[in-house]
Image (cartoon, helix red, strand yellow):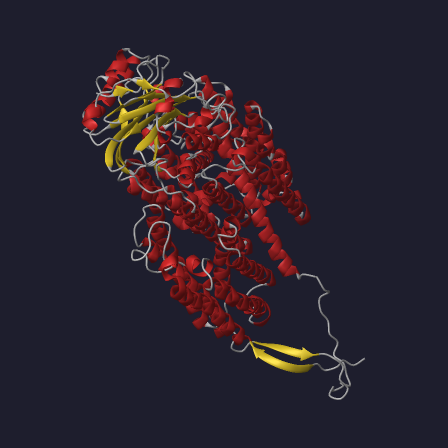
């Protein structure tokens, strides 16, 4: 049968699709800008802090989403843009996969999916404004920006090399787009946090420039579509005009729905990369939770509890020295990963011992599965490097997720639905990822035959390889499992405070990603010169503080991730027993030493480890040096093996760099979202120039049942309306506390300035201050502690309604060390006595009232006890001078810790000297203005376990 020749009805040049898309998109924004300025100029330049003339140019969101008629015009033109937009996305797919053939069908489908998702997300934030549904609007905006990175990089990658004009424009516009992001974020912070007049106008210009670059980027397609066109044909039978062919040409095509082999292979590889990256994230999640769970027990025992033995579960991979067992684990690694998820599922058990036990099993099995894979694939350098790169990406993903959860991990066993956990979701993803690995391994069939049959044992030192890897694992765990750790290890007092975790955590994540990206250059990463850079950056990190130390920490992070594949390669090619035993025993010893430098008073031989972080860091770098020396020799022998698996290496390295860029972009969006939703600090009550101060010992933000407690702490602080609050035992930036910076969430959600207190490398248990008032300056003190644990203090000057008021937040030593407490209290009294300002003392003193240390503090410091008639005190005390004292309250801990909240209400006065000495005339609550009273919700049974106790009510004073 002959076929009817189709009639060509119309040919449309594809370039006109690009033209119409550009025209409608620019019209939407520019016409809305013109109409908005014409109709509501003063309203759309007004923001939450300033208006005209300080701010004189509107932001994109104010222009397009706030006012009629500009919003309606904008939405109409965006609707007109949507048709050409979808057409452009599909045209680019056909152009790159069928015409120019610059990419495979698999990559083309990936880019097509990104383009469609990005277009739909654009409609989400355009048609659902922040006033309609703030959360949905933000999610759509974040998704749109998140897709911009792979879209622009993907289009640039798939551009035809012959068309250099288009490539040049795309490189310029992509660079301009991403270079604009840092200054835009900077000026947003200047506006949102520092409230600088005019900063939002500058931010708006950068925001508008992103629109120009974004639309211009897609307009470049017109260059490549010059000879590309759409054809409309009519295939209806038309005997009058149809030309019948006497011979028919057979037509064949793939059956509908089939995907060609290369596309299927690409999609399978991408899926495998994604699922294994998630399993790597699970590994780092369980590893970082292990010591955190162990720490709960010695915290309550006030010494060695016996549960520390669970740390030795990391020695489980030593059994992989038994070759049949190793091959079995490797063959069924997906099943081992699946069983290891008991560590994630441990949150279902309320009993802390159960949670610790299951988590230990989980991390032991997960670690064993990863190590077995590395050793068994040591004859296939492509597979090995791919696995290690994925493992490193899991670390970066862990940092990004923790940034999104305010340094908590939503799948840790200390999390649940009540405190922000998503353990069930994480568990489901883990099951899916494990099953995917299991099915892929069985379908590939290569797990049944160990690749180690043809592996060669390279000459080298098993001891050097093991010690190097163990030290590397410790360094990554202790310093880089959270994006803010290196900042908190080196923080200083105001005004030279150093970088804030948001947004500077992005730099930490970028540094780790850059290290992974350059890790394939083994001659560089295993060279002595590069090692010298790493050692020097470690020295700078330790010696200096604030910004200088942070820069050193960034370089060190880049160095550590850059050597990770080479060090793992060295681990995999040596005798398993000696190598693995030395690796994980050195890791465990370093973990214990990392604790003993601060917990020296409670452990045997602790006196020798006291405050010796310098020795730990030197040891780490020396042991890493041994591992690098061993890896350097192997790097030269691996060249031919890498060439044999070049296709795997090429795909793994390319995908790694794409995911690194993705995680950096995601961290930028997370930081931006957090900054945009940060509450600006403002006192709870301003009419009476009053403030409420409090002191609380919070046991490292783990409650009495081993759950993360910062959300409950936040609620208590909010309901008590504490304007200044000091926290003791607050430093959680160590392995044993999970590298958490729990105060970030409270500061951002309630609107506080934050002083972290002495840096984690100062070897204290931590004291931290949150303030609704600007911090003019602060000093971090290490109080005299010749025998016992190192005591800390913050001495800060705050701008309280225009009056400088000094505060001390301090934590003295234990009851057993009387001489230490005498010296510490003498120092605190000296600081207070020599200050000319009104003063508030919030401290942990460890004495009964009216005893020697009590008088040394209050008489020697020339301050007043808030209530000398309160005889039932031992740890926490509140003192003051130069202020009008309004009230005093003691609030129960509510199960968050074993220590109450003590609080005082004060008023700033015009004549502080008249209030240097206190009177103690008490008055009933009825005589106190309502604005100056404590909240009534804490009477009786209170709320969430918090209530007024001891007196069962607040006490109020005449002055």
Extreme residue toward the top, this view = 851
Q: Is residue 199 shown above or below 773? A: below
Q: Is residue 885 visible?
A: yes
> Viewed as shown, does residue 788 lie left or right of 361?
left
Q: Is residue 609 visible?
A: no
Q: Position of residue 753 (x, y in %)?
A: 34, 38
> Viewed as shown, does residue 481 lie left or right of 259?
left
Q: Is residue 49 shown above or below 28? A: above
Q: Position of residue 39 (x, y in %)?
A: 40, 64
Residue 765 vs residue 658, the one in the foreground: 765
Q: Position of residue 120 (x, y in %)?
A: 56, 59
Total tally of numbered discs in the picture:
0
Residue 5 vs residue 382, the one in the foreground: 5
Residue 585 vs residue 302, the one in the foreground: 302
Q: Position of residue 937 (x, y in %)?
A: 46, 27
Locate the C terminus and report the quarter of the image it occupies. Answer: top left
Report the residue at 30% width, 17% height from top.
787
Quarter of the image holding residue 859?
top left
Extreme residue toward the right, this view = 1
> Viewed as shown, does residue 545 lie left or right of 696?
left
Quarter of the image holding residue 601?
top left
Extreme residue toward the bottom, this view = 240
> Viewed as shown, does residue 561 lie left or right of 550?
right
Report the residue at 47% width, 57% height from top.
149
Locate the N terminus and report the quarter of the image it occupies. Answer: bottom right
């Amino acid at each position: 049968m002959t076929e009817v020749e189709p009639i060509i009805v119309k040919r449309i040049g594809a370039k006109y699709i690009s033209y119409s898309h550009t025209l409608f998109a620019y019209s939407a924004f520019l016409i809305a800008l013109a109409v908005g300025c014409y109709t509501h100029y003063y309203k759309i330049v007004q923001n939450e802090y300033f208006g005209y003339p300080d701010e004189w140019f509107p932001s994109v969101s104010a222009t397009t989403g706030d006012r009629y008629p500009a919003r309606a015009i904008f939405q109409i033109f965006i609707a007109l843009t949507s048709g050409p937009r979808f057409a452009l996305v599909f045209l680019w797919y056909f152009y790159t996969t069928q015409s120019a053939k610059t990419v495979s069908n698999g990559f083309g489908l990936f880019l097509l999916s990104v383009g469609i998702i990005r277009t739909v997300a654009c409609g989400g934030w355009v048609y659902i404004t922040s006033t309609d549904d703030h959360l949905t609007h933000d999610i759509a905006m974040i998704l749109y920006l998140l897709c911009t990175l792979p879209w622009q990089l993907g289009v640039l990658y798939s551009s035809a090399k012959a068309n250099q004009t288009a490539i040049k424009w795309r490189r310029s516009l992509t660079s301009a787009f991403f270079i604009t992001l840092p200054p835009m974020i900077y000026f947003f912070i200047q506006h949102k946090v520092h409230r600088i007049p005019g900063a939002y106008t500058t931010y708006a210009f950068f925001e508008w420039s992103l629109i120009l670059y974004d639309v211009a980027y897609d307009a470049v397609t017109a260059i490549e579509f010059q000879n590309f066109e759409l054809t409309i044909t009519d295939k209806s039978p038309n005997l009058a005009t149809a030309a019948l062919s006497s011979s028919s040409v057979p037509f064949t095509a793939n059956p509908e729905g089939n995907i060609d082999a290369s596309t299927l292979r690409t999609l399978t590889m991408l899926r495998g990369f994604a699922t294994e990256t998630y399993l790597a994230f699970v590994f780092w999640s369980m590893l970082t939770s292990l010591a955190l769970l162990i720490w709960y027990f010695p915290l309550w025992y006030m010494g060695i509890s016996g549960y520390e033995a669970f740390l030795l579960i990391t020695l489980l991979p030593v059994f992989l020295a038994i070759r049949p067992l190793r091959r079995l684990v490797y063959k069924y690694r997906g099943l081992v990963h699946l069983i290891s998820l008991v560590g994630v599922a441990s949150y279902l058990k309320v009993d802390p011992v159960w949670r610790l036990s299951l988590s230990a099993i989980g991390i032991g099995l997960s670690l064993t599965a990863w190590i077995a894979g590395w050793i068994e694939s040591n004859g296939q350098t492509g597979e090995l490097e791919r696995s290690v790169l994925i493992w490193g990406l899991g670390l970066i993903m862990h940092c990004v997720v923790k940034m999104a959860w305010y340094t908590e991990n939503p799948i840790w066993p200390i999390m649940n639905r009540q405190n922000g956990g998503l353990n069930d979701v994480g568990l489901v993803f883990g099951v899916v990822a494990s099953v995917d690995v299991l099915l892929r391994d069985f379908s590939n069939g290569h797990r049944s035959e160990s690749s180690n049959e043809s592996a060669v044992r390279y000459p080298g030192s098993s001891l050097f390889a093991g010690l190097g890897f163990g030290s590397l694992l410790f360094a990554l765990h202790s310093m880089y499992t959270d994006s803010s750790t290196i900042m908190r290890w080196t923080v200083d007092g105001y005004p030279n405070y150093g970088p804030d975790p948001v947004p500077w955590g992005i730099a930490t994540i970028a540094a780790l990603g850059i290290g992974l990206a350059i890790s394939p250059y083994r001659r560089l990463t295993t060279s002595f010169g590069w090692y010298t850079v790493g050692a020097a950056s470690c020295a700078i990190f330790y010696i200096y503080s604030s910004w200088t130390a942070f820069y050193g920490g960034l370089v060190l992070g880049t160095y550590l991730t850059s050597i990770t594949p080479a060090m793992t390669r060295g681990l995999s090619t040596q005798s398993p027993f000696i190598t693995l035993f030395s690796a994980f025993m050195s890791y465990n010893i370093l973990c214990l030493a990392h604790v003993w430098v601060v917990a020296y008073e409670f452990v045997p031989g602790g006196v020798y480890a006291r405050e010796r972080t310098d020795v730990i860091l030197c040891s780490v770098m020396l042991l890493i040096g041994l591992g690098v020396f061993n890896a350097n020799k192997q790097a030269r022998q691996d060249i031919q093996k890498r060439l044999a698996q070049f296709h795997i290496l090429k795909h793994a390295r390319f995908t790694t760099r794409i995911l690194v860029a993705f995680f950096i972009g995601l961290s930028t969006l997370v930081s931006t979202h957090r900054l945009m939703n940060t509450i600006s600090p403002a006192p709870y009550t301003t009419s009476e120039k009053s403030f409420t101060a409090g002191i609380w010992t919070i046991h490292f933000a783990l409650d009495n049942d081993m759950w993360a407690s910062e959300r409950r702490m936040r609620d208590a602080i909010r309901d008590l309306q504490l304007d200044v609050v000091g926290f003791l035992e607050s430093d959680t930036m160590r392995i044993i506390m999970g590298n958490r910076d729990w105060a970030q969430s409270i500061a951002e959600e309630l609107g506080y300035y934050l002083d972290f207190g002495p840096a984690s490398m100062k070897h204290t248990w931590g004291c931290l201050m949150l303030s609704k008032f600007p911090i003019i300056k602060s000093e971090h003190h290490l109080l005299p502690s010749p025998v016992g644990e190192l005591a800390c203090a913050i001495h800060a000057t705050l701008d309280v309604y225009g009056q400088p008021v000094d505060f001390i937040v301090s934590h003295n030593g234990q009851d057993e060390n009387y001489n230490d407490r005498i010296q510490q209290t003498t120092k605190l009294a000296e600081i207070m006595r020599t200050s000319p300002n009104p003063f508030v003392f919030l401290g942990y003193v460890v004495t009964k009232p009216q005893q020697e240390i009590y008088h040394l503090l209050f008489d020697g410091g020339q301050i007043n006890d808030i209530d000398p008639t309160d005889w039932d005190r031992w740890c926490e005390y509140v003192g003051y001078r130069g202020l009008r004292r309004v009230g005093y309250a003691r609030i129960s801990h509510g199960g968050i810790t074993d220590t109450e909240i003590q609080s005082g209400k004060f008023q700033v006065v015009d004549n502080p000297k008249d209030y240097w000495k206190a009177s103690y005339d008490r008055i009933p609550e009825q005589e106190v203005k309502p604005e100056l009273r404590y909240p009534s919700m804490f009477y009786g049974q209170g709320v969430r376990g918090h209530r007024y106790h001891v007196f069962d009510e607040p006490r109020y004073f005449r002055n």
